[in-house]
Image: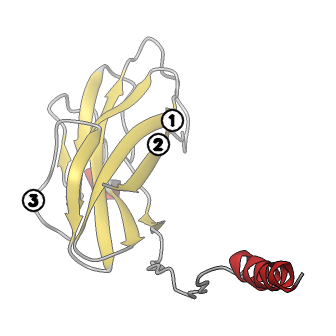
Amino acid sequence: MFPRMALSLTTLLIIPLAAIPAGALDLDTNAFVDIVEGITIGETLAMTFGDVALNDGTITINTDGSVSDPNLISFDATGASQGAFSITSIAGGAYDIVVLETIPVAGLLLDNFQISIDGAGDEAGSDTFVGVTLTNAVSTLDVGGDLTVDSALAVVGDNQSIGYRVQVNFN
């Protein structure tokens, strides 16, 4: 009877040990994130073409505010100005900038946008500018473009407002 008892006691001691994990550890660790300020943009100067005749033609406002008027449809080029915007973002980053007409006016087409960042050379010929570098945390974006007048559709009136959108996205 004693040998059986020894076997039973040994079994009772081994079974509870088998239920305990060989080793369990908890490890607290960290996740990392960089929080950066997003892009902000604000208009500091409205694009203005001034007084324009009800004649067919195109007038261009350049990013420096100068006017090109080969069809002689402007009455007062001194009242014209480029659009100017203040962009706050990460200095040295690459951005895509899109400029598009959003609210058309009958007989008036705003198109062929050009941009300049902080007075640098113009980037022209498209409505989408890819990989533009903003060298400063606060940059000035100047926007120029063409206004084409179709005298058959345009109407005489003051303060006609052609909407356009400037989008700045991280590249």
Q: Give the crowd class for mark 3: few <14, some 14-19, many >=20 residues within 10 Å.
A: few
Q: Residue at x 19, y 28 (%)?
A: 71
Q: Which residue is mark 3?
A: 121
Q: Residue at x 86, y 86 (%)?
A: 2
Give x and y (percent) for residue 96: 30, 51
Mark 1 vs 3, N-terminal side: 1
Give 150 or 91, whichever is nearer the viewer.
Answer: 91
Element on which disc 2 rests = strand
Q: Quadrant of the N terminus?
A: bottom right
Element on which disc 1 rests = strand
Whether residue 117 is visible to the viewer of this picture, yes or no, is no
Q: Is residue 50 above or below residue 150?
A: below
Residue 1 in the figure: left or right of residue 71: right
Q: Give the crowd class for mark 2: few <14, some 14-19, many >=20 residues within 10 Å.
A: some
Mark 2 vs 1, N-terminal side: 1
Q: Give the crowd class for mark 1: few <14, some 14-19, many >=20 residues within 10 Å.
A: few
Q: Residue furthest left?
A: 121
Colour scheme in the image?
A: secondary structure
Whether residue 68 is visible to the viewer of this picture, yes or no, is yes
Q: Which residue is mark 1?
A: 102
Q: Residue furthest front?
A: 1
Asked whether the beta carbons under mark 2 and mark 1 sit within 8 Å of each other, the answer is: yes
Give x and y (percent) for residue 143: 30, 53
Amino acid type, label 2: Tyr
Amino acid type, label 3: Gly
Spatial CA distance of label 2 from label 1 is: 5 Å
Q: Which mark is residue 85?
A: none
